[in-house]
Image (spheres, rainbow, N blue to C red):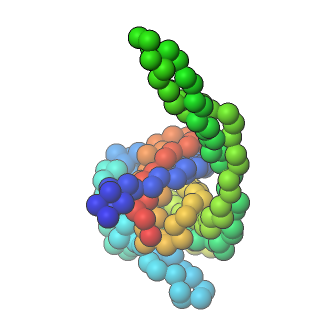
Amino acid sequence: MALAAACTPSQQVTVTGSNAAAPAPSAVESVAVVPSENADGTSKDYSAQLESRLRAAGYRLAPRTEATLFATLDHDVGEPRTEIVEFEVPEYRTEERIERVNGQFVTFYEDVLYGYRTETYEETVYPAHVEVSIYRAGSGAAPPETVYRGRARTEGRCGDMDHLIGPLLDALFADLSRSGDTVHEHRVKVEDC
């Protein structure tokens, strides 16, 4: 059991950002985290996780009434799907060889690779994402101006956002200062769930 606990699986995360890097913390007076509004009310609020990452990145957090920028966090775990995973298993056969050594016959046995067989298993995978948006409130009837939007996506065996939110936000915040619509790949550790 200790060995299983020590082996934390990892999964690939794809991070995409908006065409502009997030504003540098020094250029921002303050930021407030606005809880995401889900119509169904079933979504858990991870605002504290976002606040923690913003604070660690150097942003000054403030109440909504005093903030110049606002940050929201959207997250979702999609419907699971089953994948068939194939892998190759080496096949060996034992060959026997008899040789004369110092006047006596000696039998040697050797395992020789003679091919591979394909084995398969089914694995359930869950698509998941987090998206952080930073925007400046519009004045009057003007809509809010998005100054940054970043999205981290993954697909793996874990379908529990409680286990995924931290690693996905970490991957997203690693790319927070990068600009452009470029895609960055990360491997993150996800506690077995």
x%, y% of residue 99?
A: 52, 18
Compared to 160, does 55 lie above or below? above
Residue furthest out toward the top: 102
Rendered residue at 33%/61% (across/down): 5
Rendered residue at 51%/76% (across/down): 36
The answer to whether residue 62 is left or right of residue 173 is left
- Which one is nearer the viewer's eye here, 59 or 191? 191
Compared to 130, does 80 lie above or below? below
Counting the numbered discs, the total is: 0
Rendered residue at 44%/12% (across/down): 103
The answer to whether residue 155 is left or right of residue 48 is right
x%, y% of residue 176?
A: 47, 47
- Which one is nearer the viewer's eye here, 92 or 64? 92
The answer to whether residue 61 is left or right of residue 36 is left
Res. 184 in view: yes
Compared to 173, does 140 lie above or below? below
Rendered residue at 62%/45% (across/down): 89
Res. 133 in view: no
x%, y% of residue 71?
A: 46, 64
Q: Quadrant of residue 95?
A: top right
The answer to whether residue 173 is left or right of residue 113 is left
Compared to 34, does 178 lie above or below? above
Residue furthest out toward the front: 103
- Which one is nearer the viewer's eye here, 102 or 148? 102
Q: Quadrant of the C terminus?
A: bottom left
Q: Quadrant of the N terminus?
A: bottom left
x%, y% of residue 86?
A: 69, 52
